[in-house]
Image: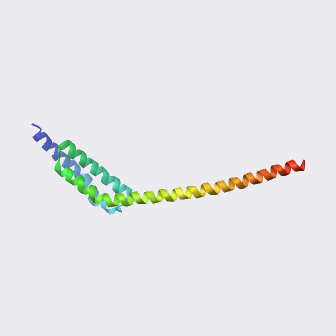
Amino acid sequence: MLGLPLAMARFNYRLARLPPQLIEDVAIVRLPEESALRLGYERILIDCDRAAAHLLHDESATTRACRLRDQTAPARVTRALELRRVEQHEEAIDAAEAELLRGHRERFLHRLREHISQSHTER
């Protein structure tokens, strides 16, 4: 009973999937593999194909989602490692800046105490 409606829905999904696929084939592939825009766009395609695979029982959507996920895995790992390196660098800079500020504060407080003690001895 659901055979024909599901077949029509799969056909409609495949038609609807053509423009995003064309955009990927023409424009997105020109971006670096680790580009956030490219990875995000490919993630959307994977999610759409997974949804179609689940809702429409579409094996070709399952295959496309798995293939694109496997294809983009190295770039996603590279991107994640790069983001982690940037975070670690920022944390190191933050720690160095905090240490620098701590040193300035200690010198300021030391000079302030000296100034206060000198003003008390002058009285």
Residue at the location (30% across, 58% down)?
72
Residue 119 seen by the camera: yes
Residue at the location (52% across, 57% down)?
90
**Looking at the image, which residue sits at the far top?**
1
Question: Could you tell me residue 21's position as x and y percent?
Answer: 25, 55
5 or 23, which is in the foreground? Answer: 5
- Marks counted in the figure total 0
Specify how the rendered protein is coloured: rainbow
In the rendered structure, the answer to whether residue 101 lies left or right of residue 55 reads: right
Q: Quadrant of the N terminus?
A: top left
In the rendered structure, the answer to whether residue 111 lies left or right of residue 94 reads: right
Question: Could you tell me residue 83's position as x and y percent?
Answer: 43, 57
Residue 27 seen by the camera: no
**Looking at the image, which residue sits at the far right?**
123
In the rendered structure, the answer to whether residue 121 lies left or right of residue 53 reads: right
In the rendered structure, the answer to whether residue 29 lies left or right of residue 64 reads: right
Question: Could you tell me residue 20's position as x and y percent?
Answer: 26, 52
Question: Could you tell me residue 119's position as x and y percent?
Answer: 85, 49
Residue 100: quarter of image: bottom right
98 or 5, which is in the foreground? Answer: 98
Residue at the location (83% across, 50% down)?
117
Up the image or down, 94 lies above or below 51; here it is: below
